Image (cartoon, rainbow, N blue to C red):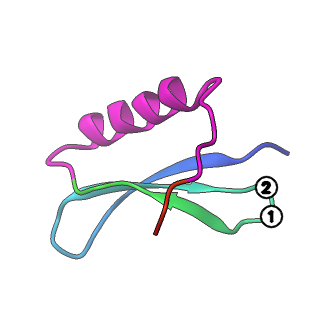
Amino acid sequence: MAGKFEVYEDRAGKFRFRLKASNGQVVATGEAYETKAAAKKGCEAVQRAADGAAIEETAS
């Protein structure tokens, strides 16, 4: 099973997303959005940005 995005409403009434790995572990979370539709667009943006993205090491 592949990972999945979950869109949910937080305690403040804002919408957020989290990316879960196939084992159920949360591997990424999104910022707060005003609408569920905006949170879904955030998921799509992450999908587009991650496709073929390079891994870079940076200094701490």
Task: Name the residue at 33% across, 56% down.
Answer: 16
Q: Which residues are magenta?
A: 33-57
Q: Residue furthest front?
A: 59
* For residue 25, side relative to residue 9 (left or right): right
Instruction: Compare residues 51 and 22 and report the one nearer the observer.
Output: 51
Q: Is residue 37 magenta?
A: yes
Task: Name the residue at 72% across, 56% down.
Answer: 21
Q: Determine which residue is flagged by label 1.
A: 23
- The crowd level at tag 1 (other Cα within 10 Å; few <14, some 14-19, many 20+) is few
Q: Residue furthest bottom?
A: 11
* For residue 16, side relative to residue 11 (left or right): right
Task: List x then y, in percent, for residue 38.
Answer: 25, 36
Q: Determine which residue is flagged by label 2.
A: 22
Whole-number angstrom distance, CA of label 1 to CA of label 2: 4 Å
Element carrying mark 2: loop
| Amino acid type, residue under disc 1 in the picture | Asn
* For residue 15, side relative to residue 42 (left or right): left
Q: Is residue 39 magenta?
A: yes
Instruction: Compare residues 46 and 3 and report the one nearer the observer.
Output: 46
Task: List x then y, in percent, for residue 57.
Answer: 59, 52
* For residue 15, side relative to residue 27 (left or right): left
| Amino acid type, residue under disc 2 in the picture | Ser
Task: Name the residue at 61% across, 24% down.
Answer: 51
Residue 14 vertical position relative to residue 7 in the rendered view, above or below: below
Task: List x then y, in percent, for residue 60.
Answer: 46, 69
Callout 1–callout 2 Cβ contact below 8 Å? yes
The quadrant holding residue 43 is top left
Element carrying mark 1: loop
Check residue 11 in the rendering and tell me which mark sits there, or answer none: none
